[in-house]
Image: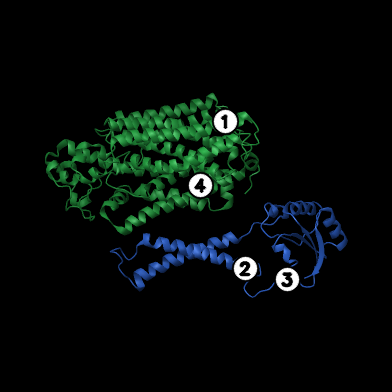
Chain colours: A green, B blue
């Protein structure tokens, strides 16, 4: 079977993308567009690291799920998912760096990581058993480390299966199946814990039991988009002649179906919170609808309406133009989805922490519960309103007027993704593709001795 | 259909049927119809059947269901009988969405079933002539109309392509 040649030209293009991303990330730190805590820098780093780590993790997960389900259709291009899974090595480094910086207090991404805030906040104290820097750092190391272990196992087993040649007992494949089956429950539970720590806990007072699924579905759709785009690129370069329209059609169906699944989870989360109308839950959507309306509604339009109506027909899933178009849009859409999961909470935390550290002298004696909250919550959330009142009323707002949300109006890079955010996205995407392509180049594109290879070559829908 | 003499061959296996249909197409024999107990993969393109338009009907039924549910609830809850539920506004779009979804699915599915029954000439109390009861069980059938293909060439075709049985029947 043919091997992908990672040409210098492509290497240089991707390296240029990585440098662009690095520059954009550095600019958010140095340009003075950021606040004293470099919130924009840290949240951009978290946003992109978590997004691409989750994509790599979901690729490994779907590979394991497909192996466990005796699926065979994907076998011709399973190296793409194996290679995407190998990006977990980079993801491990990125998240370990974020974990370390959280552990050492370099960033102020997380409200629960600010001792002064926790001291006066009973909600954060109650969650401190899980939301603490030890769990964040060592939990990330152990759990993502385990994912890396499985991703490496799948890859090395798959390569050794091919090297050993034809084997009537399918010994290597049986072994792969054991690892795949073991990975599924490990990933199912640990992925939720990681999503809670990395992403949900930026809104430290808020929680949603659906959130990990919702975030996972978002990453899964993005993973399918990237698979489609990588395969289209490789097919355009003359590789993967055995990946036919039938395989692309099935990937298109997955993109279509899981866009709807994502919407289902999004809506299930939204409607229950809307219906119950409990103050400590609605704050999450209150912020997003009022301060981030473009992202909030745009999220639904590009991640649901667009793929739903474009990919509904049979032929749009089989035509490379329409499929690629939707894949590009939806990939960007889910990146924006992660953006609006992370940025409002981080902005809020930075605001509260700065309030507390700059001048809330009487803050420690204050009771957290307050009457300026008409969400119906009693002892929770948004403690900064108190400080905002007397100590720092110059910090911008009337607490009665805006319910404790929306500090300081529009902020580039926080309210909407700016050029620097898009540049950072391109940088991380290039980094991701660089690793996937270099991993693809190290083994044949199609495993010749996978037991399902014939089924996959003759796949027909 | 009445008073047509039909010559049909029964095959034991769908692979044999597929090969036989290919042979018939190569020889430009006019096949009246092919009957199988289950959908045979790859048969439609060989027979040259055009794509079904049932899904377009399904989309229209679904869209009708969406409109019925959404406009219906809008009218009921804002004009006909406005009731306050849980302090929510009368026109509470999030609460409408599950029902809108359900009616979309209901209209699309029932509409497609009814349409399919109508265009296939099926329905409760309707009896149809069939060639052989075993085509709903384990036999795969190719049928020729005698106007298109005489009995001798039909039987030789069936013999060549390995049909298990050959019969003729007036429909």
Find the distance from the CA under tag 3 to the CA under tag 4: 44 Å
Report the residue marked by disc 1: A159
Q: Is A41 located above or below residue B94 in the figure? A: above
Report the residue marked by disc 3: B129
Find the distance from the CA under tag 4 to the CA under tag 2: 32 Å
In the rendered image, residue A257, in percent from the top left (x then y), is placed at 50, 51
Mark 4: secondary structure: helix
Find the distance from the CA under tag 1 to the CA under tag 2: 52 Å
Is disc 1 on the same chain as disc 4? yes
Between marks 3 and 4 in the image, the one whose residue lies nearer the viewer: 3
Mark positioned earlier in the residue sequence (4 or 1) = 1
Circle on res. B117: 2
In the rendered image, residue B11, in percent from the top left (x then y), is placed at 77, 57
Residue A453 occupies quadrant:
top right
Report the residue marked by disc 4: A255
Q: Residue at x 57, y 38 (%)?
A: A174
Q: Is residue A153 left or right of residue A424?
A: right
User: Disc 3: which chain?
Assistant: B
Is disc 2 on the same chain as disc 1? no
């Amino acid at each position: 079977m043919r091997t992908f040649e990672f040409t210098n030209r492509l290497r240089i293009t991707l390296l240029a993308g990585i440098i662009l991303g690095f520059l954009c990330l550095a600019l958010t730190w140095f340009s003075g567009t950021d606040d004293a805590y470099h919130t924009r820098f840290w949240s951009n780093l978290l946003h992109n690291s978590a997004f691409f780590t989750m994509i790599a993790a979901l690729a490994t997960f779907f590979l394991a799920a497909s192996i466990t389900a005796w699926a065979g259709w994907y076998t011709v291009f399973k190296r793409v998912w194996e290679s995407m899974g190998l990006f977990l090595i980079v993801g491990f480094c990125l998240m370990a760096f974020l974990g370390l910086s959280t552990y050492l207090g370099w960033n102020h991404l997380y409200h629960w990581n600010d001792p002064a805030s926790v001291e006066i906040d009973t909600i954060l104290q109650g969650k401190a058993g899980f939301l603490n820097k030890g769990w964040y750092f060592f939990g990330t190391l152990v759990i993502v480390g385990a994912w890396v272990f499985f991703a490496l196992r799948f890859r090395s087993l798959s390569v050794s299966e091919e090297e050993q040649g034809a084997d009537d007992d399918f010994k290597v494949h049986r072994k792969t199946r054991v690892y795949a089956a073991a990975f599924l429950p490990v990933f199912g539970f640990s992925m939720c814990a990681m999503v809670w720590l990395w992403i949900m806990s930026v809104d430290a007072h808020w929680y949603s039991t659906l959130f990990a699924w919702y975030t996972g579905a978002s990453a899964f759709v993005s993973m399918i988009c990237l698979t489609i785009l990588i395969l289209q690129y490789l097919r355009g370069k003359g590789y993967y002649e055995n990946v036919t329209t039938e395989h692309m059609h099935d990937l298109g169906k997955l993109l279509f179906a899981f866009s709807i699944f994502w919407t289902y989870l999004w809506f299930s989360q939204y409607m229950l919170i809307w219906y119950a109308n409990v103050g400590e839950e609605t704050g999450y959507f209150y912020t997003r609808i009022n301060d981030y309306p473009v992202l909030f509604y745009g999220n639904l339009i590009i991640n649901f309406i667009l793929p739903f109506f474009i990919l509904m027909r049979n032929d749009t899933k089989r035509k490379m133009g329409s499929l690629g178009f939707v894949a590009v849009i939806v990939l960007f859409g889910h990146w924006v989805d992660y953006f609006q999961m992370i940025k409002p909470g981080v902005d809020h935390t930075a605001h509260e922490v700065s309030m507390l550290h700059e001048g809330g002298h009487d803050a420690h004696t204050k009771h957290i519960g307050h009457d300026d909250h008409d969400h119906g919550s009693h002892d929770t959330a948004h403690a900064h309103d108190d400080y905002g009142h007397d100590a720092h009323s110059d910090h911008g707002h009337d607490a009665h007027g805006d319910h404790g949300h929306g500090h300081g109006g529009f902020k580039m890079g926080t309210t909407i993704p700016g050029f620097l955010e898009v540049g950072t996205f391109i940088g991380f995407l290039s980094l991701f593709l660089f690793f996937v392509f270099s991993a693809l180049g190290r083994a044949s594109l199609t495993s010749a001795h996978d037991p399902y290879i014939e089924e996959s070559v003759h796949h027909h829908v | 259909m009445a008073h047509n003499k039909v010559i049909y061959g029964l095959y034991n296996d769908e692979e044999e049927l597929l090969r036989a249909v290919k042979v018939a197409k190569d020889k430009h024999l006019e096949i009246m119809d092919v009957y199988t107990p289950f959908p045979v993969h790859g048969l439609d393109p060989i027979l040259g059947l055009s794509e079904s338009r049932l899904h377009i009907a399904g989309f229209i039924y679904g869209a009708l269901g969406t409109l019925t549910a959404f406009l219906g609830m809008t009218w009921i809850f804002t004009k006909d009988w406005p009731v306050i539920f849980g302090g929510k506004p009368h026109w509470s779009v999030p609460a409408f969405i599950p029902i809108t979804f359900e009616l979309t699915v209901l209209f699309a599915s029932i509409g497609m079933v009814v349409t399919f029954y109508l265009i296939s000439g099926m329905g409760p109390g309707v009896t149809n002539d069939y060639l052989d009861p075993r085509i709903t069980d384990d036999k795969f059938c190719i049928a020729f109309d005698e106007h298109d293909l005489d009995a001798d060439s039909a039987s030789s075709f069936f013999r060549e392509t390995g049909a298990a049985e050959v019969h003729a029947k007036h429909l």
